[in-house]
Image: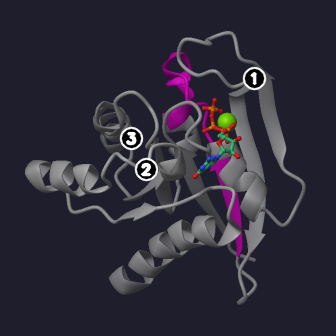
Amino acid sequence: MQRLKIVFGGPMGAGKTQAIASLSDIPVVSTEALNTDLDAHAKVLTTVGMDYGELALDDGTSIGLYGTPGQERFNFIWPILSQGALGVILLIDHSAEDPIDDLERYLASFADMYEGRIVIGVSQIDRRPERPFAIYRDWLDKKERMLPIFPVDMRKKEDVLLLVESIIAALEHES
Ligand SMILES: Nc1nc2c(ncn2[C@@H]2O[C@H](COP(=O)(O)OP(=O)(O)OP(=O)(O)O)[C@@H](O)[C@H]2O)c(=O)[nH]1
Ligand SMILES: [Mg+2]
């Protein structure tokens, strides 16, 4: 059986762990610890190693879902987890102080070490509805980065699936 891998990256609180919990067919293995960096994000738990889940597609293909820790002090883990991945889903927290700065920094890190397909999901839009979604498109256009980008809520399985399918569709298109 073919074994495929998709990685979730992005800042603290964007919803990487939640995304895998929403989509996985198996109980998720996660490495969460008490968050001691409350300045970066107020949530109680944060990933300190990785999350792992699995998704079976209709054709029997099984996809391994890997979540990275968002804190930049763990950035040495990002390239290790991204090795051999079909694609990276970069999640951005729309309600963060400066989500464009997050996009710029995390995209630079992931694009630097990973040559494959990258898809962007912007979560937490409901928590900051007055901020326009167009800021991301405008920034990507300005930087001439033609990456697919979607507004998503990681608590919704169909939204996570949309991101995964966008990576798979791109691969089918390429092959
Ligand atoms: N309101 C709202 N909450 C969301 C949305 N997407 C995810 N969440 C919630 O936001 C929180 C995100 O937390 P995590 O999934 O732990 O974030 P993470 O990206 O794994 O963070 P680190 O492991 O610390 O890097 C969870 O409680 C989710 O349920 C969204 O679109 N709107
Ligand atoms: Mg996490």
Q: Is residue 172 magenta?
A: no
Q: Position of residue 35 (x, y in %)?
A: 71, 17
Quarter of the image with the N terminus is bottom right
Which mark's residue is nearer the viewer, 1 or 3?
1
Q: Position of residue 122 (x, y in %)?
A: 44, 52
**In the rendered view, does 118 fall on the left or right side of 77?**
left
Query: Which badge, 3 or 2, is on the more N-terminal residue?
Result: 3
At mark 3, the secondary structure is helix
Ligand 1 lies under 8 Å from the Cβ of mark 1: no
- Judge the density around disc 1: few (<14), some (14-19), many (≥20) Cα neighbours within 10 Å: few
Looking at the image, is 70 positioned above or below residue 138?
Answer: above
Which mark's residue is nearer the viewer, 3 or 2?
2
**In the rendered view, does 84 fall on the left or right side of 43?**
left
Residue at which label 2 appears: 129
Quarter of the image with the C terminus is bottom left
Q: Position of residue 151 (x, y in %)?
A: 44, 61
Residue at which label 3 appears: 110
Which mark's residue is nearer the viewer, 2 or 1?
2
At mark 2, the secondary structure is loop
Region rendered in magenta: 62-78
